[in-house]
Amino acid sequence: METKTLDVREIAPRERHPLIFDTFKSLSDGASFVLVNDHDPKPLYYQFSAEHNDEFDWEYLEEGPDVWRVKIGKKGANGGSCSH
C-alpha cells in the first residue's frame, strides 16, 4: 500500500489542522500518511491525543531543523497499529 504524503509547508497555518484531520479521517483502518511540515508539529500531536486518543499512531521520520516528517496512521478497528 502506498503511503500518501501531505506537505503543508505552503498552506496557510489556519488551514493546516483542518486539512490534516480531514486527511486522517479519509484513511482506511491501518492506513497512514506522511505529514511534511516546517516546524515540529507537537501541538498537532496533542490535538490528535485529545480528539482521537487510541485511534492513531505517530512516528517521527525526520526532526528538523528545517523539515519535519511524521508518519500518522489510523489504527484498525481492532485497535492494532498499522504495520507499514
Image (spheres, rainbow, N blue to C red):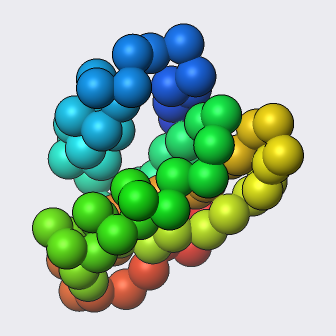
User: What is the number of callouts on the image?
Assistant: 0
Q: Give the side of residue 64 with respect to residue 8, left or right.
A: right
Q: Note whether residue 11 is visible.
A: yes
Residue at position x 81%, y 36% in the image? 66
Q: Nearer the viewer, residue 68 or 31?
A: 68
Q: Give the side of residue 43 with respect to residue 76, left or right.
A: right
Q: Note whether residue 1 is visible.
A: no
Indicate the quadrant where residue 18 lies: top left
* Up-down relation of residue 36 to residue 65 (above or below): above
Q: Give the side of residue 31 with respect to residue 75, left or right.
A: right
Residue at position x 50%, y 62% in the image? 42
Residue at position x 61%, y 68% in the image? 59
Residue at position x 28%, y 26% in the image? 14
Give the residue at the far right of this rendering. Answer: 65
* Up-down relation of residue 10 to residue 76 (above or below): above
Please provide percent x and percent y for residue 38: 65, 34
Indicate the quadrant where residue 81 lies: bottom left
Please provide percent x and percent y for residue 58: 51, 69
* Up-down relation of residue 79 to residue 51 (above or below): below
Indicate the quadrant where residue 55 lies: bottom left
Q: Could you tell me which quadrant the C terminus lies in?
A: bottom right
Please provide percent x and percent y for residue 35: 55, 41
Please provide percent x and percent y for residue 65: 84, 46
